[in-house]
Every structure is written in C-alpha cells, then in structure tokens.
Amino acid sequence: MSAITLPGLVNPHDLSTDRQFSMNLARGMEVLRAFTMVDPILGNREIADRTGLPKPTISRLTYTLTLLGYLSRVEGLQKYRLGSGVLSLGYPLLVNIRVRQIARPFMEQVAKETGCTVNLGMRDRTNVVYVDTCRVDQGNIYQPDIGSTRPLLSTSIGRALVLGAPAGEREAILNRIKLEDPQRYAADLPAWRQELKSFAERGYCHSRGDWRREVHAVGVPIRVPRREEPVAINCTLSAYRLKPETLEREVAPRLLDAVRQIEVACGMP
C-alpha cells in the first residue's frame, strides 16, 4: 500500500505536481501545526523556521488565518497564538468518535481498579493523539490531556496502534517514521522488534519507560468497524509506584478484558 493513501503520511512537497492537491491549503495547515504546547506563541520568522516556508508566504498565511479566526494576534509582540476556530474544528470530531463514548465507562472502571491513568488514542501522522483520558495517577508528571500527543514507536499505545494496523499500512507508517526522524527511529527500533516478538503471545504492548523513564505503560489496540478510525488504549503508571510485574500481572489482564468488552459493544465479533 502506498503511504499516500494513509492520512498524514505524505510530505506536501512531494505533491507539487499533483493538480488535485492544494498546496496553499497544505501550507496553511503546516502553519497551524507549528504551534505546540511548548511553543504556543510564535512570530512569522519562527513559523518560517519551523515550516521551511518563505517569510512573505508566512506573512500572507498568518494574516489570512487571523482574519478567519484560526490564529489570534498577540498585542505588543507582533506574534500569534492559535485561535478559537481551531478548537471548534476539533469538537465535532471528538463527539462523533463512537468508540470514545463506548469506552469511557470501561476506562473509568480500569482506572478505579488499578490506580493507573487510562488513555484512548488514535494516530495523527507519526504520533498518537489522545482523544480521551481518565487521569488517576497524580504522580505522573506528564499528565496527558485530550489533544496531547506521544510518538508512535516510543510508547505502548503507539506501538499497539501500529501493530493493530494491516500489514501494508504498518509498513507505510514505519517507512514514514524512518524518513521523518531517522535518529528516533533507530533509538526506538530495539523496543519495536521486542514488541513484534511478544505481542502475538500476550496481546498487549509494554513500555518500560521507553518514552519517559518516569512512566511505564501497557497498551492494547481496539478492533472497530472498518468505517471508524483505528484506536488503542493504554494504562500508565508512575515508575515510583511500580511494584515488580504490577503491569503484567494486575493491570494488563484487566485492560485486555475491558478491550474485549469494548469491541463487543462496538459490534465486533
């Protein structure tokens, strides 16, 4: 399967000769993606550096996005932050993710029984984006939130998403990660190879502090009808609270049981 058929796995610059592809729209979206939790306020020069686009182009795009309400100008700084229009775009997606509504009570039950923070996520390019979370483990200094992201191959939930994908899609995702960040791909490769060996036997992925050493986790893909976006679920626990084999013996079986119930509720055999 070609990577171009999978959302988020294409480089816009590779489509410059595609007459159906709107480069202006793609550039506008790249401007919006330049803003992060770490860098919520950016000027035109900073956006140009992050996107690789010429500053005159950035000036036109930020002007347009501000008039449309997707950016907000920060008075006195000649800089911008994301506007409320971006949030309004995301809300219809969240409320129409059917598995999110179905999974919520099961997530709450697992969180209550284990003391773990439980998260539901889907793929966004080469990351996982959380679409729901039950935050119980207050010792987790990397408290997740709806819309926050994690790298696919560095996390149990990310590896679960990749392993839950058909073989062709899995290959396309891995190829894109390798092209986008070769150093990170090389660093994550040993954990990925280990997961390939153990997932078929145990049915879950296990991160032993692979993304952040202070946080351990187990993750499981959730089967959903073909018309719905693939999702995965994880349980995270602070390393200081972790007792030997807690995740394997106590948490993983509860999570696997919850996933089976969620899949049945989604209409999966």
Image: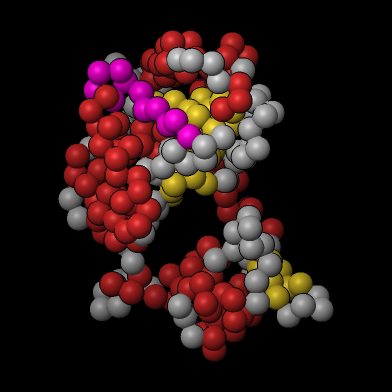
Dividing the picture into quadrants, the one containing residue 207 is top left
Q: Of residues 194 and 169, which is closer to you in this image?
A: 194
Give coordinates of residue 47: x percent, y percent: 56, 75
Task: Give the answer, above or below, for where 203 lies relative to 122.
Answer: above
Q: How is the image coloured?
A: secondary structure
Residue pushed farthest right?
Answer: 76
Dividing the picture into quadrants, the one containing residue 228 is top left
Q: Of residues 172 and 61, which is closer to you in this image?
A: 172
Question: In this view of the protein, can residue 187 be seen by the observer?
Answer: yes
Please state the extent of the stretch shown in magenta in the rendering: 199-209
Q: Residue at x 63, y 58 (%)?
A: 38
Task: Give the answer, above or below, for where 85 lies relative to 15.
Answer: above
Queried whether the magenta region covers residue 205, the answer comes back as yes
Give coordinates of residue 17: x percent, y percent: 25, 78
- Numbered circles on residues, count: 0
Horizontally, is 263 left or right of 63 in the view? left
Q: Residue at x 33, y 66 (%)?
A: 11
Horizontally, is 179 left or right of 242 in the view? left
Give coordinates of residue 201: x percent, y percent: 25, 18
Q: Residue at x 45, y 15 (%)?
A: 245
Question: In this view of the protein, can residue 165 be seen by the observer?
Answer: no
Give coordinates of residue 184: x percent, y percent: 37, 53
Queried whether the magenta region covers residue 202, the answer comes back as yes
Dividing the picture into quadrants, the one containing residue 249 is top left
Quadrant where the image shows the C terminus: top left
Q: Residue at x 44, y 30 (%)?
A: 208
